[in-house]
Image (spheres, helix red, strand yellow):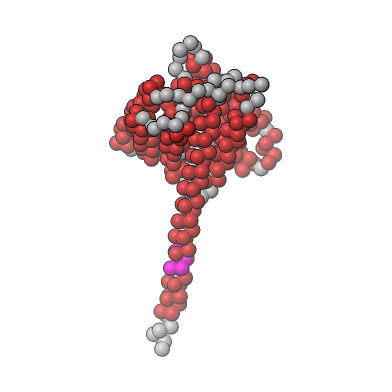
Amino acid sequence: MGAITPTTPRMGVTLRESRAYRDWRLLAVTNLIIAITLCVAVAVAYAAAALIQARYAHLKVRELARVPAWWAAIGLNGLGAALHVTSLNFGPLSLIQPLGVLTLVIAVPLTAVTARRRATRLELTGMASTVVGLVGLTLIIKTAGKADTLTRPELTGLIVVTIVLVTLLGLLGRRPAASTLWEAVAGGIAFSVCSALCQTVVVTVGDAGAAALLWPTTLLAMLAISTFAIVATVLTQRSYRKGLSAPLAVTNLVNPATATVIGVSLLGETIASTGAEIVLAVACGLLSAFGVAQLARARETAPTPEPKVLTG
């Protein structure tokens, strides 16, 4: 009897550990399902918003303010952003970021459906190339380091550089017969800078408490976030006026690329990829560029719906 006693607690511990492991796996699978579901919902919201914006891309901002459907698109963008933040509570960024390309996967066929036509071969090959390239870039190029904040000189410098760069790209896009992709690039940069500034505000408030919201640096960051968000929305709206797919693909490329540059140069992150992985990343970048070129060609050949005209 005495020989059995020592094994009994061990058997009990093993059973408890086994049950805990099953519970942990169940929780992990549940979180994964929730994260993927939220990512799909985010993609649907963003794709629907982009489609609505594209139908009114020929209008000026003052005219857009009188269009209820455009405000619905803004609401869908806000919903997408909220769901994206929520999804990060259930899955890692390494999973969430690649699933962001679902927006393009949904938007391209949705554009064809609403135009009552089939997606062209150029659209499908361009979409596939861009998506594969984007996923590859996201999975290969990894950054390491804890979440950091911008110092006051870095914050000021980033805002000034962004204003100059976005203004220049926006002006290039306003030239007669200029490509709308200039504005798509500008919008992607502005959205990415918004994310970097949001990280600074969130981390600062998390470390110092709500009182940090009244600090001059935090107030400047929040003002810049609001301004760049509006500018990015207007620029991406304008970039859709000759077609949706190519500008949307460019914005999806520029946004994470700019985020990586900001993270490495200003936020203390380091490139964690090996030399071979960087070579593969270059190949993925070229594949994505090929996809964007295909989508740009597709919008020149595919029939586009008549733009919405305001009445009354």
Q: Nearer the viewer, residue 68 or 29?
A: 68
19 part of magenta stretch: yes
On screen, residue 293 above or below 27: above
Question: Looking at the rendering, which quadrant does residue 309 occupy?
Answer: top right
> Which residue is depicted at the point 58% across and 39% down?
79
- Quick check: can you spot residue 202? yes
Q: Which residues are magenta?
A: 17-21
Q: Nearer the viewer, residue 69 or 230?
A: 69
Question: Looking at the rendering, which quadrant does residue 250 occupy?
Answer: top left
- Quick check: can you spot residue 161? no
> Which residue is depicted at the point 43% across and 83% down?
5
The N terminus appears in which quarter of the rendering? bottom left
Residue 117 picture location, percent across and down: 41, 31
Question: Looking at the rendering, which quadrant does residue 65 occupy?
Answer: top right
Residue 54 picture location, percent across and down: 51, 27
> Which residue is depicted at the point 49% across and 27% down?
188
Magenta part mainly helix, strand or loop? helix
171 part of magenta stretch: no
Residue 306 picture location, percent across and down: 50, 23
> Which residue is depicted at the point 51% across and 14% down?
174
The C terminus appears in which quarter of the rendering? top right
